[in-house]
Image (cartoon, rainbow, N blue to C red):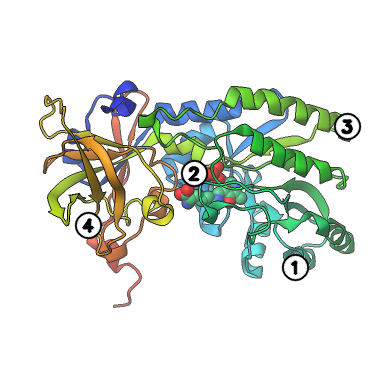
Amino acid sequence: MDNYFTSLISFYGNTSPRELIKKYGSPLYVYNESILRQRCREMVSLVSYPRFSVNYSCKANTNLELLRIIRQEGIHADAISPGEVHILLEAGYKPEEIFYISNNISKEEMRTIIDKGILISIDSLSQLEQYGEMNPGGSVSIRLNPGLGVGHHKKVITAGDDTKFGIDLELIPRVKEIARKYELKIVGINHHLGSLFMEGDVFIEGAKLLLSVAKEFSDLDFIDIGGGFGIPYRKQENEPRLDLRNFGKKLSPILENWAKEYGKQVEFIVEPGRYIVAESGVVLGKVHTIKENHSTSYIGTDIGFNVLARPMLYDAHHDIEVYKINENCLEKNYNKVTIVGNICESGDIIARDRLLPEIAEGDIIGIVDAGAYGYCMSSNYNSRLRPAEVLITAEGKDVLIRRRDTLDDLMRGFLP
Ligand code: LLP
C-alpha cells in the first residue's frame, strides 16, 4: 500500500510533492496533463459508431488550462450555467461546441443562452412553453427521465422516480403538442442517469430505454445518452476499472442498429465529467498536528472540506498517499488514523479510521483522484483561501494554472 498510484505513473514529473509545496504553498491542487489526455482519448474512442461525440461535463472542473487541453483532444462541452458558458468561451470553445443542459432557469438566463447561439436542453413542460414563447421556430433538445437512475450516493442520482430532473416519458405527447404550437424543432433528446457507475450494463439499460421512445421524435439530429462513467476510487484495494472496451463493444451495435432503423445516422453523444478529470488531480496538504482524542488518532492537516468537499458531503472515499518529510524514509509501520482538516466543524473529516503508513508532523499527504468535483466545489468557508492549481505538463514541468486566493480576494464585492 505504498504510494504506488502516483509513483507508478510518475505523477509529479520532474518535481516532487515537497518541492511543489515549497514553491506554491499548501494545500495545493496538482494535475497531470498526460493522464488527462489519456482519459480523453479513451472516451473519444469508446464506440465504433461513426457519428459519436464526447461532451465534457465541465461542472467537474472548469480550470481554463484543463478545458483547453480537453478541447484540443476533440471534446466539446456541456454547461449548466452562464458562468460555465463564459469560462468555456474564454477557453476557446465555440457556441456550437457547447450544449446547455438547463434546469429551472430564469427567462433572462434562457434569453442569454439563446442569444449566444447555444443549443438548450429543456427539462420540463413549463420551460418548454417558456422557450416556445421566447423563441418560436427554434431548435431544442428535450431531457427525458427514462425511469432508471444510478449514482454513488442518493444525492447524485438524476433519473428515476425520486429526482427533480427530466421529463417523464408519459409526457412525451404533451412535449410534442407544445413543440407543434410554437413550431419548435426537437433536434435532440438527452438524459443523464446519475453520477458514477462501474458496470456498463446499467448505462446500456438506460440507453435502451431512451432509444425505445426516441423514434417518437422525427427530426432528431442527436441523442445524448449521458455521463456518469465511474473511476476506481479504491485503487489501494485494487478496485478494477470500468471496462470501457467491453462496454463500448456492447454499446456500438445498439447505436448502429437503432440508427439503421431510424433511417438516419444521428449523432450519439456522451457527457462524462468525472471520468475525464478525476484521476488527473491530487490535492497535496501538510500535516500540522498529531493528537489522540478519546482513543482516536487524529492527523490534523490543512485539507479541510473547504478544499475538498466530497468526503464531508457524500462520505466519499479517496485514497491517501503519505510523502515522508524525510524522503529516504521507507515507513514500515502502519496505524489506523483519522485524517482531518482545519475547519471548525467536527464533520471536517477526510478519512476515518484509515490504515496508513506512520505519519509524522511535517509530512505531506496526497488525496488522490481529486481532479473532479474538487477545486470547483471548494470554498472560502471559515474565510480560508482556496488553493493554487498546478499542472505537470507532458514534459514533466510544473506550471501554475491558477494562483492561490489572497486576503484581498476575500474582500472582493464589499463596498468601501
Ligand atoms: N450530465 C449531467 C446532466 C449531469 O448533471 C452530470 C453531473 C454529468 C453529466 C456528469 O456526471 P459525471 O460523468 O461527472 O458523473 N459532486 C458530485 C457529482 C455531481 C454530479 C452532478 N451531475 C461528486 O462529487 O461526486
For discs 3 and 4, the disc positioned in front in the rendered view: 4
Tell me which amino acid carries mark 2: Ala
Q: Is mark 1 on a helix, strand or loop?
A: helix
Can I make out residue 58 in this image? yes
Q: What element carries label 2?
A: loop
Q: Are marks 2 and 3 in contact (CB under 8 Å)?
A: no
Tell me which amino acid carries mark 3: Glu
Which residue does the numbered mark 1 point to in the structure image? 126
Which residue does the numbered mark 2 point to in the structure image? 91
Which residue does the numbered mark 4 point to in the structure image? 342
Tell me which amino acid carries mark 1: Ser
**Marked residue nearer the N-terminal end (3 or 4):** 3
Left or right side of 213 for 299: left
Quadrant containing the N terminus is: top left
For discs 1 and 4, the disc positioned in front in the rendered view: 4
Residue 306 position in % (x across, y down): 32, 57
**Marked residue nearer the N-terminal end (2 or 3):** 2
Which residue does the numbered mark 3 point to in the structure image? 261
For discs 4 and 2, the disc positioned in front in the rendered view: 4
Left or right side of 252 for 304: left
**Residue at the image point whose x is 17% and y is 52% from the top:** 295
Q: Which residue lies furthest to the front in this view?
A: 295
Q: Is mark 3 on a helix, strand or loop?
A: helix
Q: For this rendering, which residue is in front, 208 or 115?
A: 208
**Marked residue nearer the N-terminal end (1 or 4):** 1
Is the residue 166 above or below the residue 267 in the image? below
Q: Are marks 1 and 2 in contact (CB under 8 Å)?
A: no
**Marked residue nearer the N-terminal end (4 or 2):** 2
Tell me which amino acid carries mark 4: Asn
**Residue at the image point whose x is 27% and y is 62% from the top:** 346
Measure how far apart labels 1 and 3 are at the Cα level: 32 Å
For discs 2 and 3, the disc positioned in front in the rendered view: 3
